[in-house]
Amino acid sequence: MSEHSYRLTIACPDRVGIVAAVSGFLSQHQGWIGEANHHADHESGWFFMRHEIRADSLPFDVEGFRHAFAPIAEEFDMQWQITDSQVKKRVVLMVSREAHCLSDLIYRWSSQDLDYELVCVISNHSDLKHYADWYQVPFHHVPVPKADKQAAFDEVMTRVEEYEADLVVLARYMQIIPPAMCQQYAGRIINIHHSFLPSFAGARPYHQAFERGVKLVGATCHYVTEELDAGPIIEQDVLRVRHNDSSEQMVRLGRDVEKTVLARGLRYHLEDRVLIHGNKTVVFA
Amino acid sequence: MSEHSYRLTIACPDRVGIVAAVSGFLSQHQGWIGEANHHADHESGWFFMRHEIRADSLPFDVEGFRHAFAPIAEEFDMQWQITDSQVKKRVVLMVSREAHCLSDLIYRWSSQDLDYELVCVISNHSDLKHYADWYQVPFHHVPVPKADKQAAFDEVMTRVEEYEADLVVLARYMQIIPPAMCQQYAGRIINIHHSFLPSFAGARPYHQAFERGVKLVGATCHYVTEELDAGPIIEQDVLRVRHNDSSEQMVRLGRDVEKTVLARGLRYHLEDRVLIHGNKTVVFA
Amino acid sequence: MSEHSYRLTIACPDRVGIVAAVSGFLSQHQGWIGEANHHADHESGWFFMRHEIRADSLPFDVEGFRHAFAPIAEEFDMQWQITDSQVKKRVVLMVSREAHCLSDLIYRWSSQDLDYELVCVISNHSDLKHYADWYQVPFHHVPVPKADKQAAFDEVMTRVEEYEADLVVLARYMQIIPPAMCQQYAGRIINIHHSFLPSFAGARPYHQAFERGVKLVGATCHYVTEELDAGPIIEQDVLRVRHNDSSEQMVRLGRDVEKTVLARGLRYHLEDRVLIHGNKTVVFA
Amino acid sequence: MSEHSYRLTIACPDRVGIVAAVSGFLSQHQGWIGEANHHADHESGWFFMRHEIRADSLPFDVEGFRHAFAPIAEEFDMQWQITDSQVKKRVVLMVSREAHCLSDLIYRWSSQDLDYELVCVISNHSDLKHYADWYQVPFHHVPVPKADKQAAFDEVMTRVEEYEADLVVLARYMQIIPPAMCQQYAGRIINIHHSFLPSFAGARPYHQAFERGVKLVGATCHYVTEELDAGPIIEQDVLRVRHNDSSEQMVRLGRDVEKTVLARGLRYHLEDRVLIHGNKTVVFA
């Protein structure tokens, strides 16, 4: 895990020779492949790949890699990126009043179970400030008044810019992100929805689930897009409920699956394992 | 399993003294309780219970039980029934062209894994006739022409009546049951839907799931009501899929969860473990 | 959940009339049953039951209940107890150096997800002291030198007595509890073992699992007895691993299932849902 | 699935250039890669890969491929094979008296859910002959008398040779395969064990599980080796049981997980997705 590596992710139209070109390039530069994943999507005709290459096996740094690899990328019309495993992604956590996801993510950050830079916590309430305080993480209380949500999200976006954040994680934030922000940070806002989407989108999903009498409830980690709860799904999971679980108990039990699913989805993103294509994801887990 | 028992199921408005009255009655008649389940639904204010009582411990048969228990049932406004574990339920299987559920249910019937009387198979196609033939089960081919579905379902209902069936199981039947039949057999038609309802109701759910990019697909066993795919849910389960599972592979993989969920839901019904209340079920599994 | 109730748990040899006697007693005193569970173990011939009764529906407190119920308990040779849902169990958490279970349990305590009194944390190391400090929970560093483990556990037991603890939770404590302590607190020490017992008992279970090449790893919450990792099991769960998960990754991934299984097992115990019988448990979950 | 492809599987000591050499070879011959999987085992220093290549994109057949690829294989010390997806593997099913796995595998064969040639069924009893008869599959009753097991297995091996079988599947065969046969068909005998190995190896695993009071039971699909129930594991799964599940009910419930796990493991093998390395497997599922 802690090995220093470069992560090369590629998406391009499928054709013969892509893997040969990429692996030929790596081999020519003595690149040692620690992990490699491929996916040919036969319906869209696209090809996806991810390589993890030992940094010390290559004769160049990330910038040098970018320069050397550019001709191949151009030849195959690749959408691609190369990242350095030692450069931690800068993450803003956004929360409301419920602490379970924040508590879990902050623990995983402090214990290095998840490898990221927690730059600040933003909330529309001040209830959870003490968590940030104890871990000495900046906390910004940005109320979202019904009358002027725009100003609130302008402030949020200013904060995100100031902190040079790579990613915003909505850890049960409970506010709808305005379209402008969704567009600006496309593929860079992750949400946890407390249902097994597309079932029970919108508000109070456990109460909807209780009313419908389902036998399993779930959680969905997805990228945020303008359409509410409809962005590309990264990870999902479920847990069994029974007739004697009230909607309150579902809320309580559901917290465990919410935080687990969010942590898994976030891990995939942080490790550059998620490639977004249209409204779907390729996850090289 | 094979022990001879009576199964007493009760639903009534909740109040003090129900359990005492029922267990007092059983105790007074030396009834040996093999299994007992209770559920107090705090939202609706209803109470549900199920007892399995050794038949040989009681001084009367099912009819005698009905007579003796009636005053208690009346006192507490009970919806109730008593069944004899040795009287097998008479089941009609309805299928279309896909064999996996039929094959599974017919195997479970012939091997006595599920304890029911398979009275006949009805299909709108003749493709699966050989399964019924080999097991020497009557097979009725009842085509459902678009122009005259009514006549088809009239014939189906006639068959169901002639066979004195207790239950109709739609084992991937793929036709919409008309309202009249839904009403006449309320609580007596079980369907397997090949999605995790309420997601992807209607046609081609795996293709819908593929389009949406979900990470789990599922199946739902439910009672059939007039509203399509919206009846009381008995059992559900899911299986994990990945970006490299095409919709065709989901169809293939999904068959395993479909047949397992249908078999579980059917078992609960056959053992009188399911109590319908409004659009939900209490399942004393 | 927060409703004030009494929890009556009973284990006794099975015979006709137990339920009638208990429910008759409750009914006679206007006791409102919120939840009831029964289990007749046909192999051992024992009967188990648990009732949750609304406290305000009864004319007596727990002491009064004990007095009034004693004759019935005697008549049926019952092992039984009655507890008050508002009297929180006093719990000692014992940890070593790994924080994930402590962090999870302390969060669940502080957020009242789990309803218990955290009286102190005891550890053979001081690494995790800051968790206790921040939550203002007493922390006792009790080193366990190889040369004199007896003295260490004497101190532990003294602490447990001083705090009048009802329960000791080994939240990845990593030390073997000596027989004397196991005996003294039989049924009152809960451990989380990081494997799917009985597979991989003892040390380094993930490494054992990796060596064996299993496709699922798990965790087991159980009561501690003199025989290592062999006490009555309360709860277990698993997660899927693949050929590319190293033993280090199994360790990391396994933490999530460990803390979830421990929290579930602890919840069952705290809510008096676990009845120990021989080396097995009845869990009225 | 039904697309005509060649499957190239490779295991060799890890070093720089393997992927480049293989993909360069494929690219040079215009080979279209439909699916590719890699695994670098950092502990053993071995590298594993599997490619599925469209047959019609290559200028040679399997023999031609073998010839052309041989120099690369030699250069990298590869253990490798190339198979043709249209050449079905020839499979012998061995059963005893329990029908659930046979019934499932024979259904999957006849419905082409699993793509193999069922050459015959061999059993030490004649109970299940009618299954084979109905599907017109040769059935051989080879009793295994305690006094002369050697003769019985000599006959079994003769049959396996006569049918030119590629694989033997023990579908609840319940007899221990003698060492000579294990050696001769190393990597070509698949067994389903009715427990979550390494727990409860040997006889009557559900009864062992019941005695131990576990909360989950499972099944394991593995290659057969001389050491009983200790060969390389291909697939495992579990299902939840409760205190009220008797050992007989575990047996009944377990059948579903047994047949599902066996079918999954067999599918992986038939699709050349399993690479055995030492006592473990790499499964490119």
Image: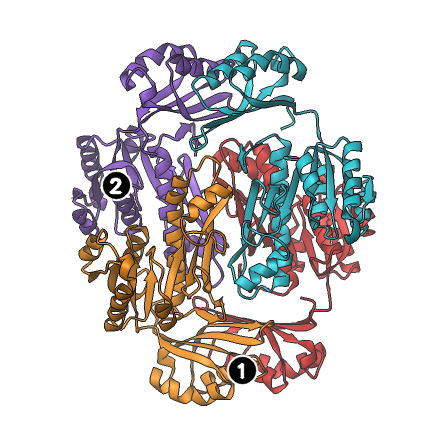
Chain colours: A purple, B red, C orange, D cyan
Query: Residue tagged by mark 2?
Result: A93
Residue B179 located left or right of residue A191: right
Please identify the quarter of the rendering in which residue A176 is found.
Answer: top left
Circle 1 chain: C
The amino acid type found where label 2 is placed reads Leu
Secondary structure of the residue carrying tag 2 is strand
Q: Tell whether label 2 touches label 1 (CB within 8 Å).
A: no
Q: Callout 2: 10 Å neighbours few (<14), some, many (20+)?
A: many
Secondary structure of the residue carrying tag 1 is helix
One can see residue C240 in this view: no
Between C110 and C155, the one lying in front of the other is C155
Q: Position of residue C85 (x, y in %)?
A: 34, 73
In the rendered image of this protein, does residue C85 appear above or below residue B260?
below
Please identify the quarter of the rendering in which residue A80 is found.
Answer: top left
In the rendered image of this protein, does residue C183 appear above or below residue B238?
below
Give the number of callouts.
Answer: 2
Please identify the quarter of the rendering in which residue B98 is found.
Answer: top right
In the rendered image of this protein, does residue A61 appear above or below residue C15?
above
Q: Residue furthest front?
A: C147
Between B42 and C251, the one lying in front of the other is C251
The amino acid type found where label 1 is placed reads Ile
Q: Position of residue B242 (x, y in %)?
A: 50, 35
Query: Residue tagged by mark 1?
Result: C18
One can see residue C179 in this view: yes
